[in-house]
Structure formats: structure tokens, C-alpha cells
């Protein structure tokens, strides 16, 4: 079943429901599922991970802390 057919079938099923409370429950559930699907990677991080990223960003503002790309590639090539 392709996406278009699936969407159409879902619409047909919903059109058959006359119970407003049931429709509201389905609506809220679908809305919740869509919002969960849109969660950003940031939202999945722990507070500790977020703090580390923010610290790294702040440290990168000072050019003294930056490392040349070639140096990073050499270092990680040796590790692999």
C-alpha cells in the first residue's frame, strides 16, 4: 500500500466516525505521534550531553582551541 492510498483509506475511516469524543481521541493520538516524530536530536540528549555541546561551542569561539582539519583526519585515521 503506497502513501497516497494509505492516507485516503485513513480519511475514509475517519469519515465513518460520528462520535465526537472518539474523533477527539484519535486526533490527539495522531497529533502526539506526529510531534514525537518531529523531536529534534537536541531533545533526545541528556542535560550532561547538552552542557558538553554548549561548552564545546563556547570553547570553539577562541581560535586558540581550534584544530586544523588535516590534523584531526590524521589522528582519527590512525585510530581506524
Image (tube, grey):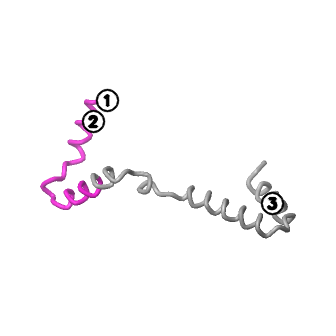
Give the image location of residue 18, x and y in percent. Answer: 85, 68
- 80 vs 29, nearest the viewer: 29
Q: Are marks 3 and 1 in contact (CB under 8 Å)?
A: no
Q: Are marks 1 and 2 in contact (CB under 8 Å)?
A: yes
**Which label sits in the foreground, 2 or 3?**
3
Q: Residue at x 54, y 59 (%)?
A: 38
Q: Is residue 32 magenta?
A: no
Question: Would you say the magenta stretch is mainly helix, strand or loop?
Answer: helix
| Residue bearing the label numbered 1 | 80
Q: CA distance from mark 1 to mark 2?
A: 6 Å
| Residue bearing the label numbered 2 | 76
Give the image location of residue 30, x and y in percent. Answer: 67, 60
Give the image location of residue 64, x and y in percent. Answer: 12, 55
- From the viewer's perspective, is 47 left or right of 1? left
Q: Secondary structure at mark 1?
A: loop
Q: Which image quadrant for residue 25?
A: bottom right
Amino acid at each position: 500500500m503506497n502513501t497516497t492510498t494509505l492516507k485516503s483509506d485513513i480519511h475514509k475511516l475517519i469519515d465513518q466516525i460520528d462520535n465526537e469524543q472518539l474523533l477527539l481521541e484519535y486526533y490527539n493520538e495522531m497529533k502526539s505521534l506526529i510531534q514525537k516524530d518531529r523531536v529534534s536530536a537536541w531533545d533526545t540528549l541528556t542535560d550532561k550531553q547538552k552542557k558538553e555541546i554548549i561548552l564545546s561551542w563556547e570553547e570553539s569561539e577562541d581560535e586558540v582551541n581550534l584544530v586544523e582539519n588535516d590534523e584531526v583526519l590524521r589522528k582519527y585515521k590512525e585510530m581506524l
